[in-house]
Amino acid sequence: MGDLPPANVLILCSDQHSRHILGCYGNPVVRTPYLDALAARGTRFANAYTPSPICVPARACLATGRYAHDIECWDNAAPYDGTAAPQASPCCWPARACRRARCA
């Protein structure tokens, strides 16, 4: 297999948001035309999991692929920049994607 062409990736993270309040999941009352249009052209998930109920640790876990206790990100007291934990790795998917795209 050769190199794959670059792809755009958009990940939407919304706090305290249930799929049950989106039109694309069948809600007959709530109107979400922009999210519905994105969902029609992308991927929707029927099930999801978060390793933390708090937004900053949950997003740090998503960025690193590790549990909150592994990266020592416990709460929203400080933003997660990928360098706070001694176990933080340059091998996480955002760092790899950025290197591939030659981000600064």
Image (cartoon, grey):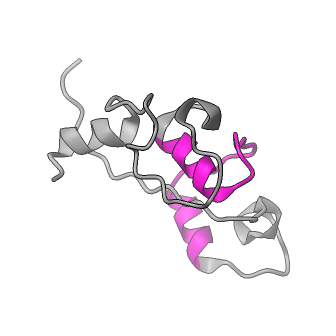
Front residue (pair 39, 65): 65
**In the depicted structure, whether residue 86 falls above or below residue 38:** above
Magenta-tinted stretch: 34-63
Left or right relative to 47: residue 34 = left
* Residue 50 falls within the magenta-colored stretch: yes
Front residue (pair 63, 81): 81
Q: Residue at x 80, y 70 (%)?
A: 21
Residue 78 in the image, given as x and y percentages of width and height: 52, 59
Front residue (pair 1, 16): 16
Residue 29 in the image, given as x and y percentages of width and height: 85, 81
Question: Residue furthest toward the top?
Answer: 1
Left or right relative to 92: residue 40 = right
Left or right relative to 29: residue 57 = left
Front residue (pair 38, 56): 56
Q: Residue at x 23, y 17 (%)?
A: 1
* Residue 38 falls within the magenta-colored stretch: yes
**In the depicted structure, whether residue 76 falls above or below residue 84:** below
Q: Residue at x 53, y 35 (%)?
A: 71
Q: Residue at x 56, y 41 (%)?
A: 61
